[in-house]
Amino acid sequence: MNTEAIKDLCYRMADDELILAHRHSEWTGLGPLLEEDIAFSSIAQDKLGHAQALYTIMHEHCGEPNADTIAFTREENAMRCSHFVELPNGEYDFSLVRHFLFDAAEYIRWTALIQSTVEPLAKLAQKIRGELKYHLYHAQTWMVQLGAKGNEESHLRMQSALHEAWPFAVGLFEPGKHEDSLIADGIFIGEHAAQERWLELVAELLQPSTLVTPHGVEPVYGGRKGYHTVYLKPLLDEMTEVYRVDPSAEW
């Protein structure tokens, strides 16, 4: 089995989870409702746990460094996260739309990985898929509430945020150089198939919201190859500040 293909897949997924966890955590104390402060903080913790689990699989089965070293010592061009997770939170409408679109994509990925021929990934997928049901339910609830049950302004703002986020969300499915190996070895269904399933799921979940997904939009690629937005470097500097003071410290 192609170890490089497994590492590439895990890096892409784990880096997305790590960076979005940091973005979600920035809402702590700033959300419009106390319940939303708690919800985004809880989801951020889950995503950080997902990233750690993936980094640990790479450490134990692919010979990569330990999870902390992977997460906190790599430079910007070594990260494989998508541009979507790097973008600043902006207004709450954008963060909600990103939350919804990203977790729909993650639900598709982890559901597919339950059938992976890589046993550690398949076992992890069983656990994470259960958590993602609640993440996705939370996100969809707000899409419907603000899209269909709010007022004209809330609908327009959510629709605008959906248009802004869409090309970056589609960019989550940027194909890697090991696509053929992932599919042939039964490790993962591949980015094209995942995107098709995601589009179907998003359309289904958005139907009661009256929000409309854009069409004919070019996806934003580059992050999977190490080319990032101007927002990633400051985020990494902030995220790794404590670790870099003393990398040998144990908590």
Image: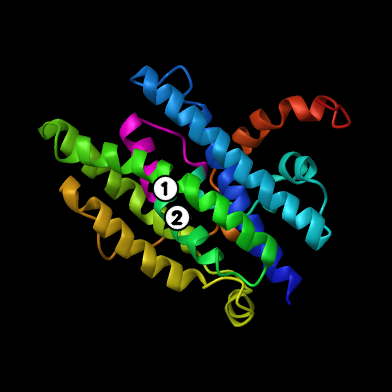
Label 2, on which residue? 107
At label 2, the amino acid type is Tyr
Q: Which residues are magenta?
A: 86-101
Residue shown at 38%/22% (left/top)? 35
Residue shown at 28%/49% (left/top)? 163
Q: Is residue 226 visible to the viewer in this orientation of the structure?
A: no
Q: Residue 248, percent across and down?
A: 89, 31
Q: Residue 93, percent across and down?
A: 31, 34
Residue shown at 42%/47% (left/top)? 133
SS category of the residue bearing label 1: helix
Mark 2: few, some, or many residues within 10 Å (few <14, many ≥20)?
Answer: many
User: Magenta-highlighted stretch: main secondary structure?
Assistant: helix
Q: Give the answer, above or below, for where 22 lies relative to 200.
A: above
At label 1, the amino acid type is Lys
Residue shown at 52%/72% (left/top)? 190
**Could you tell me if the residues under marks 1 and 2 are in contact, i.e. CB atoms within 8 Å?**
yes
Q: Give the answer, above or below, for where 159 lies relative to 177.
A: above
Pick the front one: 195 or 241: 195
Pick the front one: 26 or 118: 118
